[in-house]
Amino acid sequence: MSDTAENGPVLAADGTPLKRSLNRALRVQKTRAMLLIAPLLLFVLVSFIIPILSMLFRSVENDIVVNTLPETVPILAQWDSSTGELPSEEVYAAMARDMIKAVEAKKHTKLATRLNYEKTGIASMFRKSGRTIKKWDPEADAPFKEKFLDLHKGWGDMDVWKTIQTHSGLYTNGYFLNAIDMQKTPEGAQAQPENKQILVKLFIRTLIMSLVIMGACILLGYPIAWILANLPARQSNMLMILVLLPFWTSLLVRTSAWKVMLQQQGVINEVLVWLGLVADESRLVIINNQFGTIVAMTHILLPFMILPMYSVMQTIQPTYLRAAKSMGATNWTAFWRVYFPQSIPGIGAGSILVFILAIGYYITPEIVGGTKGVFISNRIAYHISSSLNWGLAAALGTILLVVVLILYWAYDKIVGIDNVKLG
Amino acid sequence: MAESQNNDAFVEFERVQKSYDGETLVVKDLNLTMPKGEFLTMLGPSGSGKTTCLMMLAGFETATHGAIKLDGVSINNIPPHKRGIGMVFQNYALFPHMTIAENLSFPLEVRKIGKSEREEKVKRALDMVEMGAFGGRRPAQLSGGQQQRIALARALVFEPELVLMDEPLGALDKQLREKMQFEITHLAHNLGITTVYVTHDQTEALTMSDRVAVFDDGRIQQLDPPDTLYEEPKNSFVAQFIGENNTLLGTVKELKGDQAVVQLDDGELIDCKPVNVSAVGDRTRVSIRPERVEFNKDRLQAGAHTLKAEVLEFIYMGDIFRTRLRVAGNDEFIVKTRNAPDQVRLQPGEQIEIGWLPQDCRALDA
């Protein structure tokens, strides 16, 4: 190959550059391989990637205001709220025309819901007004300012108009600000009132509890993986079944079982009271708090820690330990200096797996977590299914995804992703 | 050997037995004495108990019965890390997460030896195996032979008096293996280390050792220097296992001192040296080395019994000729002759007569 630098690219027998010739030869193989995986690729694209992207997009999407109030938004943009005067008749007229169309298309309630996230009360104002506006005529009934003010006192509230003006953009960072306990106001980004600041706390709690669960899984899983890897095949297969047994049981059943175990009238408390270790009136509170979540989730995620550890430990030959001992190392030194360093890839793989699963866990904290032991994912679920604030849910989800990616990147920098082995 | 009875025995096995399951004995009544500085090889087929013996000596297996002594002291209850025995493993067992220098430094570190002394010893050990430039590499970056040298250096770096080697050359190709055989024996003799070497390769055992212990069925079948082992096997297992061997079955007809006449199963009579037969009428397996068979009558003793043979195959192997004969109903009778200028090249189908010196033909157990 040393002559390449002097004589230019290497040529194939027919004189074409060797690279191009090789590419041509490989193209058929590559095409065939692509065709084979094409159906799967298509499936993943349609059922997974596109929905996720569209969900992520919702965290910044805000076209509902512009689409519902196409005439009002541009005119309202020129209004200067700092003068302390209400918008002009022009704005009210545009609003009247937009609303008549919106009510007809029954779109005004959706807009009301959207604006209600930003200022409570707007939803009922829109709904009440809608019934009257329906009967107006955009030409005959002008001027509208007085009519609006008669209709609902909210139309004379500066804050309502400011809210509409602030949130009229096609895209918004409002959801992301909400997700980190801030809000978008006419005066710019500001902190939420003290009593509404819960999401950052929840994020931090989710991270810390996931780390605790991961740590507990490492401590509990390491000895089990070691035993599995070092027992004769028959016994280790038997034990492996016990480790895998939880996988074959419904997640809901397992979590409910923990409820039976941990509640105040539950198995653990009853036993402790019976043994006289705990007084009947001061039974331990070990469920519906962080402790309950950590115990139940450690149990559920433990196999995800054990399996990668086991598969790595299986490859560590027992002769390494023997060699270390023959050289004069005590059992502990042999383990710590020789065995443990070789098992780190398994710990790394298990930790990443458990941490990423834990950070997005939903069912278990929901059932055993009470209010103190819930995760950010429970909040996301709440916004998806109860408050229907999908934008905020999407923003929370995006932040969670970014946090995981940052941690993954940091892990790669510190430990190196090559040091992760799943088997 | 006389010295094996001496009091200055360095390694001793006394009536050692080992069972894993409580039903069968893997090692049955092992007695062995090794003087200081000896290179002893445990040779045997797999499952013969030789590796178990090595592991008991290293401390990784405990003897079910009997005592193992090192320098006169019983080490049965001493854990492996306190025995101070160097060991080379079959797959080298170099720690993959450490560099070569760190690997060598490990036994010194656990002995709490100071840094400067450690570095000096590591360097000396690396130079000893001619690997001085490789200290910074990882085991995976070395070839099999290089890893082998490092494993050897690591077992020697803390200057143990006894080194155990468990088939250390098994993974190397033939040429490298022969080279390493010499290097290991030279090193062991130059440093005056007592070495116990386990292998199933008989050539390796013969070329390297001061004495060879042939294991089979949990017992030492014969413990002798290589030449004695090859030329004077004490039973048919050793005769079969060491080197190539022709066997003929028969019955003892006459027994006088160190002379015996055996009647083969097809009725022919031959002269033998009785080794493992006690009385006339005993069944016996007669053993003769392929290179000791003569078909040149001038070289035979007067009056010696000879046998008729038919040449079946002639194989030219360069330095030697290998001729396959049919003798007394045995189609696998091999004769080896040196490729000398005057040597006869037998042709298939030729009828010849073969014979041997009585002392080369040993009547062993059937």
Image (cartoon, coloured by chain):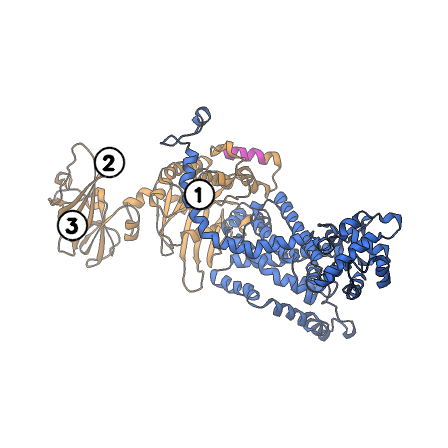
Q: Which residue is mark 3?
A: B327
Q: Which residue is mark 1?
A: B195
Badge 2: chain ID = B
Q: Which residue is mark 2?
A: B319
Does the segment drawn in magenta span residue A378? no
Tell me whether circle 2 and circle 1 mark residues in contact (CB < 8 Å): no
- Please name whichever residue, B291 or B325, is drawn nearer the observer in this view of the structure: B325
**Chain B: colour as depicted:** orange
The local secondary structure at tag 1 comes to strand
The residue type indicated by label 2 comes to Asp
Measured in 3D between alpha carbons, the distance from the residue under mark 3 to the one under mark 2, in whole angstroms, is 24 Å
Residue A227 falls in image quadrant:
bottom right
Measured in 3D between alpha carbons, the distance from the residue under mark 2 to the one under mark 1, in whole angstroms, is 33 Å
The residue type indicated by label 1 comes to Thr
Left or right: A264 as drawn, with respect to B345: right
Which sits earlier in the primary sequence, circle 1 or circle 3?
Answer: 1
Q: Residue furthest front?
A: A140
> Which chain is displayed in blue in the rendered image?
A
Crowd rating for badge 2 (residues with CA inside 10 Å; few <14, some 14–19, many 20+): few
Q: Which residues are magenta?
A: B118-126
Magenta stretch prevailing secondary structure = helix
From the top left corner, tell me how far across and down residue A341 is, in percent: 58, 47
Q: Which mark is residue B89?
A: none
Residue drawn at x 88%, y 51% is: A85
Badge 1: chain ID = B
Badge 3: chain ID = B
